[in-house]
Image (tube, rainbow, N blue to C red):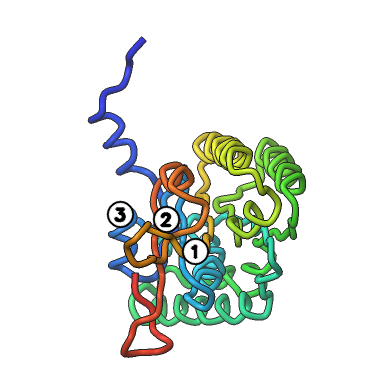
Amino acid sequence: MFTKTCADLLQQEARLPGIITFCKDLDHAIGHSGVSVGLITEFCGPPGSGKTQMCLQLCVNANLPPELGGLGGKSLYLDTNFGFSPDRLREIATACVQHCQRIVRTSRPQLAEVTSKFTAESVMESVLYNHVHVCNELTKSIDTLERLLKLGEKIRLVVIDSYSFLIRCNIENTLERIRIDHTVLNRLQILAQKFKFAIVLTNDVTTKLNGTEPSTIAPALGDSHGHRVNQRIVLGQTGSEPGGLKT
């Protein structure tokens, strides 16, 4: 009945492949190989902190050939507030392709044929997109995702940007919000562990009142949601560099 120990689970998690972020320190902080498949990773922060930028970068990186440290797969981008920019995705893809080509030319010429097939066009074709603005549309999107996975579609990343915008704008009752939140994430993670893809959510921040204490800024959707995600990265601007990020 009890076939696994905690040591088994730890080794299993350490072997999970991941999607690199191109930031070595961040990759090691959230998993030895970046954003791990089978897990729910959340990027949280105020507007302009880089959440959507990170999601677009991960879509590109998920399509990297395995020989270059990627998963060679497709991504599904579920956009809830029209934050997705195909032009920006293409810019990131072009920069990534050029970066990989430079690496191959200088240190790994034997991979020239592999990189010739990794182009900005191939990246754009690897990203599936759908706009969802109500929870029923999210459920239908997950239904379609499951059908595609069962047909053998090699989807390695599912992004919901912004997850908190969808949940907060459509569900006013707190208990119902928690129920739907957990139902959606439970179903997604079961699929992620079975078909080996990563789940990335973006979450906003909100003001948290602490009685007589000064108010603080905290991730939206509350503690119940926070306990459900596997790892959370909080993004923000540094004080010394207006355009900089901190984690």
The correct choice, above or below, for 150 with respect to 197 in the image is: above
Q: Which mark is residue 206?
A: 1
Distance (Cα) linking label 1 and label 3:
31 Å
At label 2, the amino acid type is: Val
The correct choice, above or below, for 141 with respect to 128 in the image is: above
Q: Residues within 10 Å of mark 2 (few under 14, many from 20)?
A: many
Disc 3 to disc 2: CB gap under 8 Å: no
Q: Is residue 191 visible?
A: no
Q: Which residue is mark 3?
A: 32
Dot 3: element? loop
Rendered-image quadrant of the N terminus: top left
Rendered-image quadrant of the C terminus: bottom left
Distance (Cα) linking label 2 and label 1:
25 Å
Task: Specify the quadrant of the image occupied by residue 168.
Answer: bottom right
Distance (Cα) linking label 3 and label 2:
9 Å
What is the x, y in percent for residue 174? 59, 43
Q: Which residue is mark 2?
A: 35
The correct choice, above or below, for 107 with respect to 214 in the image is: below
Left or right of 212: which side holds 125?
right
Disc 1 to disc 3: CB gap under 8 Å: no
What is the x, y in percent for residue 173? 64, 43
Going from the N terminus, do you reach mark 2 or mark 1 first?
2
Between residue 157 and residue 201, name the one nearer to us. 201
At label 3, the amino acid type is: His
Q: Mark 2 vs mark 1: give the one in front.
A: 1
Between residue 82 and residue 127, name the one nearer to us. 82
